[in-house]
Image (cartoon, rainbow, N blue to C red):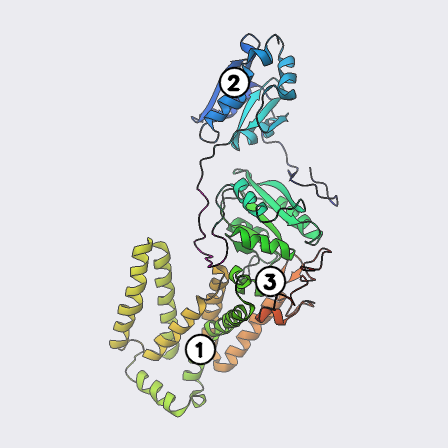
Amino acid sequence: MLKRNAKYPQDVDFHPASPPQYPVPITPENTEKLFERCQDYESRLVRAGETGPAVYACWLDGLVSGADTAEQVLKPLSDPTRFGGLKKPEEVMDAVENGGVYGPSMKRVSTMDELADAIAYGHCALVFAGTAFVFQVKTGQHRSVQEPTVEKSVKGGKDAFVEVLRVNTALVRSRLHTPRLKLAQTTLGRKSRSMAAVMWLEGVAAPDLPEQMLSRLEALEVDGAVMPDVLDSGLVDMPRSPFPQLIHTERPDKLAALLLQGRTAVIVDGIPVAFAAPACFEAFLRTSEDEAQHFLAASAVRFLRWMSLILTLLLPAFYVAVATYHPEMLPTKLLMSVIESKQSVPFSTAVEILGLLLAFELLQEAGLRLPNPVGQTISIIGALIVGQSAVEAKVVSPIAVIVVALAGIAGYTMPSQDMGAALRICRFALVLAATAAGMFGIIMGSVALLWHLCSLESFGRAYMSPLAGGGQGDTSGVFIRHPPWRDLYRDPALNGGDVRKKK
């Protein structure tokens, strides 16, 4: 049990206090009854040392390795040289506990809750009256480690997280070979009982971050933790905000870099994505590729992303405001071109832009949900044929198509899909504000957006840090990447004492 305000031991098993689900004593009969109507439940009686008392062994087929169960548990249990001459169950229990069964990981449990969790997690159990011994013999059948599909990189690592917790924690430990990388475990979901691991670097992360993360995980009251939204809405400070407040990554190398910055990570069994906190706005505009490139190239690309953010957010609203309320802001030749293209279009500028933005979202959703070859075909057909046909039919103007296309392309430069989705929502809101009040509506909408962003917090840290919220970090590092010989210190808002990154 991890105690509050105690020093975190390495690889702690943290189990929140909760009422027992199965308040019955451990017996073979109760275990059999607990898993009744589970046709993958396997059990058998094994006589200790061939002539000793019978021992009830049970496991779930498919979660355990049959060969390892037979070789590491059942075979030594029936070996006369190990258990021969034992006549009482107590003697067999002492022999098992003292190494008579040589499974790689053995644990003694004394409640039916612990036994049920162990069997459900892929352990083989030897059940006695009042107690049981569980051995970890999980099957090795799972999706192999593959290349990232979303966060692709040219010079970075070529492996991504899978759905198995221990494989994911091992991928992180293969980058950080230090005992200062701590890990605490807990279970999530009243029904799913999913295992979750909290990871942090001792001395680098602020001391209160792991404690906050474990406390929030403990407070989650959900039936199952099988989808990322359970954490996105349950761990953040303001779940109603469309902006992401947890950093998502499928890359072990990126998660290791986040831990080195002083953040705390959560990995959940069954979810091939890791979550890191605290999050800040500028972190969603960085990629792991920035650290792999020359600092000048990385600075140019990072600055381009900020320009793309402004473009995708404001360009459609700006066009609506100028074309509807402030045509005098346009140069004469451009204004004549806009007027000429609008003469035969039956819809207003605002209706054009909103309709094209909606069509853009529909095409994007169709491309994501369909299989890859079909999705690419739909995107090409939608962008070329449908768009060109709409212009030729004079349903929309060519300039409106160009504006929406530029805004959409600029939005694709966002490294985070969640940030891109939030910006698209805000883009619609700003277009409506521009429709209602022109440039004044855009200014008021932008002020409201900035106010909302500055009011957000992530685990007690300002979301707009170091640009706002009293952050003490270097604000220039938000827009460009500093040369390696100048990037010596960690963000003071995240630091736990080890301030220097380099000597």
Q: Give residue 133's quadrant in the image.
A: top right
Q: Which residue is mark 2?
A: 75
The majority secondary structure of the magenta stretch comes to: loop
Q: Residue furthest bottom?
A: 332
- Looking at the figure, which quarter contains the N terminus? top right
Report the residue at 31% width, 83% height from top. Answer: 341
> Count of labels shown?
3
Label 1 neighbour load within 10 Å: few <14, some 14-19, many 20+: many
User: From mark 1 to mark 3, how far is it between C-alphas?
Assistant: 31 Å
Mark 1 or 3 closer to N-term? Answer: 3
Circle 2/circle 3 CB separation < 8 Å: no
User: From mark 2 to mark 1, how far is it between C-alphas?
Assistant: 77 Å
Q: Closer to the camera: disc 1 or disc 3?
A: 3
- Looking at the figure, which quarter contains the C terminus? bottom right
Q: Which residues are magenta?
A: 141-158
Q: Position of residue 73 (x, y in %)?
A: 54, 22
Mark 2 or 1 closer to N-term? Answer: 2
Let me know if residue 471 is in the magenta part: no
Q: Give residue 451's quadrant in the image.
A: bottom right
**The residue tagged with tag 2: helix, strand or loop?**
helix
* Dot label at residue 280: 3
- Identified by mark 3, the residue type is Cys
- Identified by mark 2, the residue type is Lys
Q: Which residue is mark 1?
A: 435
Q: Give residue 240's quadrant in the image.
A: bottom right
Q: Nearer the viewer, residue 497 or 37?
A: 497
Q: Position of residue 158 (x, y in %)?
A: 47, 52
Position of 15 with respect to 158 (left or right) is right
Report the residue at 67% width, 67% height from top. Answer: 473
